[in-house]
Amino acid sequence: MSKSIYEPLTESGAVALAVRLGLFPEGTPLTCREIGDGNLNLVFHVVDQRTGSGVIIKQALPYAKVVGESWPLTLKRAVIESNALRTFASYVPQYVPTVYYSDESLAITVMEDLSHLQIARKGLIEGKTFPLLSEHIGEFIAKTLFYTSDFGMNQQQKKQLAQQFINPELCKITEDLVFTDPFFDHETNNFEPELRHDVEALWKDEALHLETAKLKRKFLTEADALIHGDLHTGSIFASDTETKVIDPEFAFYGPFGFDIGQFFANLLLNALSRKEHEQAPILHHIEKTWDVFSTVFANLWNEHNVEPYAKTNGWLQDLLHDIFVDAVGFAGCEVIRRTIGLAHVADLDGISDKQTRLEAKRRALQLGRTLILQRDSLRNTKDIFTTFAQTSAEGYLA
Ligand SMILES: Nc1ncnc2c1ncn2[C@@H]1O[C@H](COP(=O)(O)OP(=O)(O)O)[C@@H](O)[C@H]1O
Ligand SMILES: CSC[C@H]1O[C@H](OP(=O)(O)O)[C@H](O)[C@@H]1O
């Protein structure tokens, strides 16, 4: 298997691979569908017709699927993804799919089929609430961050691990699409003409540029822990009882606050798409994520810290404060990029009434701006909700 030379799989090729790998007993009647709906990769669902049990074969393409062959992209992202899933599984196996097999030259990851769950974004758009989502994600983030940081593992081994997750091409996508392009008149941007006035105001906003630049610098330079790097609600499978995080191909050693910020942002985008009286469960998820994250992280800090300064009075509180402020700022960037940048979210784009959709997008731009500019003065999740409630339909220019 290791001598394989890369070529994109077809559905029949995926079946043949599953058989070659012995994933199903000889003679099993198998069907396969390519079900990838993300921006980058192929995803094959191979199913035993008799039992309904399946496996997922995910394969990276040598380019970004959403744009096409004109945007070449490293196949190494498949190795990053399978290694990240395996690393996360060593701390929180309950929150990631099991990886059965990976092949660097074919750029594939073969993993547990999670089809009994639903992509959280889709469920949230349908009005589901997934009661345990925030508890699980708070714990996922706290444990993966703590145990891969200088506080939770041997500090020399951490540097070795960070080397394995050097991920320059995928980081550049985030540096460009999240932190840069939406704030300038760039060809990757994508927004309705009615928003141009608001978007142009954003492009000219010097104060916003300064604060976004500071957040970008953090993303470029702070190697706190192994982060997922793209923890939006489309990267999470959920049900009423289970939660699984997928798609960590953007993983690298980055700032503590980034995954929390991405998750907050995508919850806020969903809340913006809802009527006011339906927003409470989503805002509750933000509160709960932070509560669980900070509690679990603090417990790990107090009980398993390898750093001699850990017991220094005030350091943990100081760090949690910084993580919160950064998360709020990163959330602001993500809210803006998902509204006017290259890759949108169905939560907003799927609002069928044009006026309602434009109002939600204007509120998103205003919310993103406020989160970035006022992040230092927001002390807790209640302050995020106040900011959210103060956004107006007039949006950025209000
Ligand atoms: N382990 C899995 N089990 C079932 N379906 C999956 C699994 N992984 C991915 N998928 C399906 O494939 C889609 C795209 O997967 P994703 O990893 O997000 O791809 P991309 O990297 O292209 O964004 C998901 O939205 C989901 O529908
Ligand atoms: C050209 S990549 C755009 C966008 O797509 C990624 O998301 P996903 O792989 O989950 O579809 C990531 O968010 C990138 O910023």
Image (tube, rainbow, N blue to C red):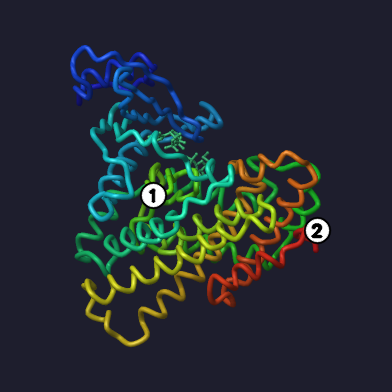
Pick the quarter of the image with the N terminus: top left
The front one of 189 and 124 is 124
Q: Considering only vertical position in the picture, is 33 above or below 221?
A: above
Q: Amino acid at mark 2?
A: Glu
Residue for badge 1: 241
Q: Is mark 1 within 8 Å of ligand 1?
A: no
| Disc nearest the viewer among 2 and 1 | 1
Where's residue 161, x and y in %? Answer: 25, 54
Where's residue 87, x and y in %? Answer: 26, 50
Measure the alpha-carbon separation of dots 2 and 1: 39 Å
Asked where in the image residue 283 lies, by quadrant, the reply is: bottom right
Task: Determine whether the residue tagged by mark 1 lies in a helix, strand or loop.
Answer: loop
Callout 2–callout 1 Cβ contact below 8 Å: no
**Other residues around mark 1 within 10 Å, as few (<14) / some (14–19) / many (≥20):** few
Asked where in the image residue 24 lies, by quadrant, the reply is: top left
The front one of 100 and 319 is 100
Q: Earlier in the sequence, mark 2 or mark 1?
A: 1
**Other residues around mark 2 within 10 Å, as few (<14) / some (14–19) / many (≥20):** some
Q: Considering only vertical position in the picture, is 387 above or below 123?
A: below
Residue at the image point whose x is 70% and y is 60% from the top: 366
Tell me: 144 left or right of 67: left
Residue for badge 2: 394
Residue at the farthest bottom position: 313
Q: Is mark 2 within 8 Å of ligand 2?
A: no
How many marks can you see?
2
Pick the quarter of the image with the C terminus: bottom right
Residue at the image point whose x is 26% and y is 45% from the top: 86
Where's residue 172, x and y in %? Answer: 48, 47
The front one of 1 and 211 is 1
